[in-house]
Image (cartoon, rainbow, N blue to C red):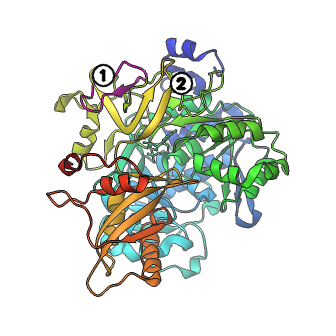
Amino acid sequence: MSNIGSYEKRRENFNWDIAKEVLGWKEGEILNIGAMCSDRICAQGKGDKKALIWQGFGGKQKTYTFNDLRVLSNGFAKFLQDLGVEPGEKVCLFMDKIPELYVSFLGVLKMGAVAQPLFSAFGDESLEVRLLSADTKVIFTTRKHVKKVRKIQDRLPALEKIVVVEGNPAKLRDEEIYFSMEDFRVEDFTTFESDAGTPSVLHYTSGTTGQPKGAQHGHGSVWGQALTTSWVLDLKEDDIYWCTADPGWVTGTSYGIIGPWSLGVTQCVLDSGFTSAAWYQFIQDNRVTVWYSAPTAIRSLMRDGEALVRQYDLSSLRHLASVGEPLNAEAVIWSEKVYGLAFLDTFWQTETGSMMITNFPGMKIKPGSMGKPFPGIVAGILDLKTNEPVTEPGTVGLIAFRPGWPSMFREYVKQPDIYRSKFVGAADDAMPAELRLDESLWYVSGDRASFDKDGYYWFVGRDDDVINTGGHLVGPFEIESALVEHEAIAEAAAIGKPDEVNMEVVKVFVTLNPGFEPSDDLELNIMNFIRKRLSPLAMPQEIEYSEKLPKTRSGKILRRYLKALEWGEEVGDLSTLEDD
Ligand code: WT7
């Protein structure tokens, strides 16, 4: 089904049922992502095929077949059932990119619970906010990260069980449970009978205001994830695929677990720190054929130059794709020059669950453009003031999509009003709780772009104050709330500041409480405070002290004004900023 002609032909003949054909899924079979990625592949006679080639620090390696995935994920599913976890309850996965993370993800879904992966570098405050919001019942973690859970567990009334899946069991507290995946292979497990709307994966994403929102997906997302994996990532039976994203973020689950495994494709995971040399070595050692990564990584590879590339045999590579931030034309051109392959850009979001605007094999590539809407996706650019779709190429507006694609998020946990506010053109009672292509609604992404006369989309920037650092979204509100908990800080504003590699890094403006003076020590102290509480991503790279922060008449800090100054942009009419 793959490679069946041009973009236009695919668009014309499009039907989401094609995803079922690509997956070899028959009506009447269970629609459960956990089983689709393991049991179903084994039933197709591919139980002995390698599913996961894992490498950790120090070159440690482990390999798992699809049959291993099947029996080990059965183990997790059974273990959760025995703990008394019910379908629909949230199970957090808080660990590095170890095999247990990938397998437990499938196990949680198999027994009908909701998988809530959280980035293992999160500090206790980032963790607390997300576990509290989701009423998470069980957390799977490791010896290395359990300390952060201990710190906050008393403030999480819904959290019943802390399960440690790696490390020395002797060092655990009495109430903590040790679970060794390898010692609990379960041959038979009856999969929970989920359908398209059954909650599956929950990812938190940061907005401009308020705490992060939990975007809830359903098992039906697999249609979108599998078909884009097939057409855009072009995965085929014999590929060795590498997605560099961490499953703490949506790319790492949609395309680092569900996409490849639902298609029965072998994938590799590298769970050690980034260096260009280590990455090239990994590609060479594993004969990686398809590589899905992000612009910040690509720019880091560029910085380390072509000579390094020449020291490795990267001839196995046949297809490269990118997501998460604007992929600059230079990076596309450079990759074509040094790898003989251009990185192809894809645009999507946590909320969309799968790729929305894409470049794929067979399409003409315009370096610097995000490509065209995936067949089956109806995209538009909405006028910044009226929300009406623009018709003139080159007009900058909001990127929007007609709701109803299979992997669209189904709610923001406990925030129906914010969910509804992401859709325009609808009466309140017409919000798309049911997935359907509604001719009157648009889902508004929160990004600005334009399309050209050939229908290619060009990214302009975000329409809000969310900071995108190295392809990860960080909410300014989260940083500001944490900053004002520091004893020295009275008021704070956080913005993104331009950065050559990471696109943006966090910069903060603070006013100090009486008795505190700016100093190098204080600066380090504040940086570490944020790194520990939130994450290394949220840690400010620059702190500017000021006597007073600019505010609206109603007292809101004018982040946008600070940002315009920082970026050397037109500050514009202050009175309009004040209306914000
Ligand atoms: C935001 C979504 C699902 C991808 C991982 C991030 C930015 C994403 C691109 C791109 C320019 C991009 C947007 C978007 N973004 N892809 N190809 N070009 N910007 O998911 O954390 O929900 O972030 O990342 O601003 O809204 P996310």
Q: How many marks?
A: 2
Q: Is residue 123 visible?
A: no
- For residue 420, what is the image quadrant? top left
Q: Between residue 406 and residue 137, name the one nearer to us.
A: 406
What residue is shown with label 2? 20
Q: Secondary structure at mark 2?
A: helix
Residue designated by label 1: 438
The answer to if 396 sits in the magenta stretch is no
Secondary structure state at the residue bearing disc 1? loop
Position of 58 compared to 444: left or right?
A: right
Classify residue 514 as left or right of residue 193: left
Nearer to the camera, 404 or 274: 274
- The local crowd at label 2, few if under 14, some if 14 to 19, many if 20 or more residues have their Cα within 10 Å, is some
Q: Is residue 391 magenta?
A: yes
Which mark's residue is nearer the viewer, 1 or 2? Answer: 1
Kind of residue at disc 2: Lys
- Tell me the chief SS of the magenta region: loop
- Rounded to the nearest angstrom, the CA distance separating label 1 from label 2 is 23 Å
Q: Is residue 205 above or below residue 387?
A: below
Residue 465 image point, x, y percent: 35, 51
Q: Which residues are magenta?
A: 378-393
Lateral position of residue 407 relative to residue 57, left or right: left
Q: Quadrant of the N terminus?
A: top right
For label 1, count other residues whose C-alpha is less than 10 Å away and answer few (under 14), some (14-19) or many (20+). some
The residue at 47%/58% (across/down) is 118
Q: Is residue 3 visible in the rendered structure shown here?
A: yes
* Residue 19, x across and y down, in percent: 53, 25
- Which is more toward the observer, 333 or 193? 333
The amino acid sitting under disc 1 is Asp
Instruction: Determine the residue positioned at 33% across, 71% down.
Output: 510
* Label 2 C-beta lies within 8 Å of the nearest ligand 1 atom: no
